[in-house]
Image (tube, rainbow, N blue to C red):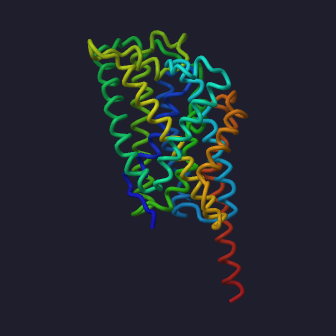
Amino acid sequence: MNEITRNQFASMLLITDAFALFCFTGSVSLMTVIGLTVGILIQFILAVPLIRLGGISEKPAYIFYLAYLIMWGGLLFGMQWKTSRHIYIPYENSGGIWGKLLISGLIALVCLYISSAGIKAMGRASLIAAFIGAVCLLIAAVSGLVHLETENLFRAVSGRSLFEELATGFALSGGVGSFAILLGITKGSSMKNAAAYFIGKGVLTAALTLTAVMVAGGIMEITDFPVVTAAQVSQPFSSQRIDSLFLIVFAIFAVFSIAVQTAASAYIFGELFPKFVRFRSSVSLLLMIGAAFLLWKVPLNSVVIGAGAAAALFAVPLIILVRRGAESALKKGRT
């Protein structure tokens, strides 16, 4: 059985969440920190039907999650295109559509290599990637505290209400599609596995957004990517720029984020079409790149993306539970 451990499960999902925060555009403030963290608690509560299911195993639901994973994978490609212009990835800046295709092709090749080893092997690799990212982000956070200007906490204004921040949190949570799939192949209690993930997500989100507020609060109005700007402004070492380390983490997380969606999509293809053995990952990646060209102008915090995340997290699992309950009641009535 290609099962993964709780730590591997959480690492793969948290890498995707971190990458989405890297690519978040717009201002962040203390209201954002509160809204996103409270939103994660709400997401955990809404995930109870999915947790009770222990993951998704219904074929009709697989079709929905496959489409959702393709969409989110396409959005991840689009996020990489947009954000890389800000952190100076050379080919992306100079190549136009061909640059996008080139960098997407390179990412796809690495994703194919990672996903071809299987979900279990990718889970082990994600632990290493998550550790490297955590060290870099911890350095940035500590540097932010050392150079903290208290007034930055109150200078930054996002311009969004608490409800809008909650909605933004759902839009940033596109990884719930892979959460639904991977939960079913993770060892141990589904509730404990889900709790570990959501706790980690809450800590990660609060740390990244609060660091962005502390470091970049004074220039928030002219900042396109607050988390990236915070990494660039923070300078903990006299001889090494933290944004150089961040660029490495950004590239690693971009690859792993898309690889997770690819592996989950390939898994669904295998469940829907057992005879479709070869090229599952390749087809998934091609569909994601196609989706990226269709969706790359869609804002990350749009209502549609948030609604899709809510459906993947809560609505579809609830429908499955209700249908199962109705079928069980009918069987009892017949007997």
Image quadrant in which you'd find residue 168: top right
**Residue found at the very far bottom of the displayed protein:** 335
Q: Is there any visible trace of residue 284 in the rendered image? A: yes
Image quadrant in which you'd find residue 207: top left
Please state if 238 lies on the left or on the right of 168 as rendered.
left
**Who's the residue at 34% across and 19% down the image?**
144
Closer to the camera in the image, 155 or 240: 240
Task: Point out residue 204 in the picture as x, y percentages from the top left corner.
Answer: 41, 36
Closer to the camera in the image, 175 or 194: 175
Task: Point out residue 160 in the picture as x, y percentages from the top left corner.
Answer: 59, 23
Q: Is there any visible trace of residue 321 in the rendered image? A: no
**Who's the residue at 54% across and 44% down the image?**
175
303 w.r.t. 320: above or below: above
Image quadrant in which you'd find residue 170: top right
Task: Point out residue 70 in the picture as x, y percentages from the top left corner.
Answer: 65, 45
| Quarter of the figure with the C terminus | bottom right
Closer to the camera in the image, 71 or 205: 71
**Who's the residue at 39% across and 50% down the image?**
196
Task: Point out residue 161 in the picture as x, y percentages from the top left corner.
Answer: 59, 26
Q: How many marks?
A: 0
**Who's the residue at 60% across and 17% down the image?**
94
| Quarter of the figure with the N terminus | bottom left
